[in-house]
Image (tube, rainbow, N blue to C red):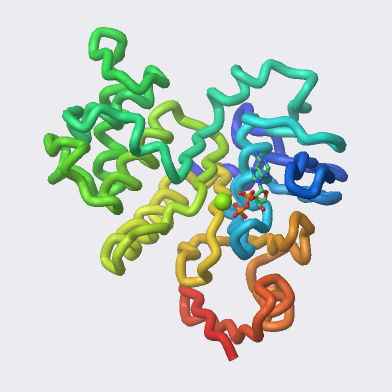
Amino acid sequence: MATPAKGTGPGYPPLALRCTDVRVWRWHQASATRKPLLDDVSWTVRTGERWALLGPNGAGKTTLLTLAAAAGFPSSGTVEIMGETMGQTDAARLRQQIGFVDARDGDRFAPMLSVREVIRTGATGTIGYFEQRLGMLDVDRADTLLGTFGLGPLAERRFGDCSQGERKRVLIARALVGRPRLLLLDEPGVGLDLPGREILLGSLARLADVDPLLTMIVTTHHLEELHGSTTHALLLRDGIVLAAGPVNETLTDRQLTACFGIPIAASRRGDRWTATAG
Ligand SMILES: Nc1ncnc2c1ncn2[C@@H]1O[C@H](COP(=O)(O)OP(=O)(O)O)[C@@H](O)[C@H]1O
Ligand SMILES: [Mg+2]
């Protein structure tokens, strides 16, 4: 059977995300002023695209990803997620179609749960493991994802004994058990050693092949952490979008330099990017 074209799968709207004139303000106690965390952000993500969200610390990446996850509201402007407008829809139901893996999620699980059990909790959307609530399809799906993320040999290992890289892959696999249409990863490469990072990037690229309609947005501040299937990039600085579009047109030396505030020379070799200052 032919693979459906992007955005044309059954039940998949053509746009995964659309932000229009989005602003998020936060009160800054020390100066008694309000501070824009996101300023006039307009951004369109089509179904099946793989975006990298890049910017220095404090640029607003997590704030923007939280809006995409239906886990926050803009102060002004509109956020449409898979065709539904935040504020006019049931956000909890929408969140069931979104896999969101936050940098701190790993601390929430009991360390004695096995890797297999933590992944299966994705079917119930719980932190605890409730075997009696799992169906055969859930179990099959969780076991398939164990393989996709190279976790088969670790299936019975205690989650608490896993390395940071292994935990990250477990949590991403868990987020996919419920068959989300949108996968959001906040800095998945942080804290990983070189082999851990390489295995993670390989898994993400494989996932993109296995599930071509899955839309992915991954935040990072390192070009080296872009996985090979990245199609688009958005550069954010001080809450402002400096550039957004196809990855080769967006990750130019000029635009990266403006984004990170130091001279940057970027290069692409095959599927991988590197950046050097100077
Ligand atoms: N709840 C909050 N209240 C006030 N300031 C916040 C809050 N959350 C984030 N910030 C600030 O907003 C800015 C953007 O944060 P964030 O989205 O986490 O950036 P990034 O993920 O790119 O590092 C940062 O300066 C951060 O300190
Ligand atoms: Mg962040």
- Residue 34 location, quadrant: top right
- Residue 261 location, quadrant: bottom right
- What residue is shown at x 34% (from left), y 47% (from top)? 168
In front of the other: 106 or 169? 106
User: Would you say residue 37 is visible in this rendering?
Assistant: yes
Q: Residue 111: x, y in percent?
A: 21, 32
- Residue 146 location, quadrant: top left
Q: How many marks?
A: 0
Q: Residue 245: x, y in percent?
A: 72, 63
With respect to residue 264, does 130 lie above or below? above
With respect to residue 146, does 247 lie above or below? below
- What residue is shown at x 61% (from left), y 35% (from top)? 69
Task: Single out the residue that lies furthest toward the bottom.
Answer: 278
Left or right: 53 as drawn, with respect to 148:
right
- What residue is shown at x 36% (from left), y 34% (from top)? 174
Left or right: 141 as drawn, with respect to 22:
left
In front of the other: 131 or 87? 87
Task: Single out the residue that lies furthest toward the front.
Answer: 30
With respect to residue 244, does 39 lie above or below? above
Q: Residue 154: x, y in percent?
A: 15, 43
Q: Residue 47: x, y in percent?
A: 64, 43
User: Would you say residue 3 is visible in this rendering?
Assistant: no
In front of the other: 127 or 57? 57
With respect to residue 22, does 202 lie above or below? below
Left or right: 172 as drawn, with respect to 167:
right
- What residue is shown at x 46% (from left), y 40% (from top)? 101
Q: In which quarter of the image is the C terminus?
A: bottom right
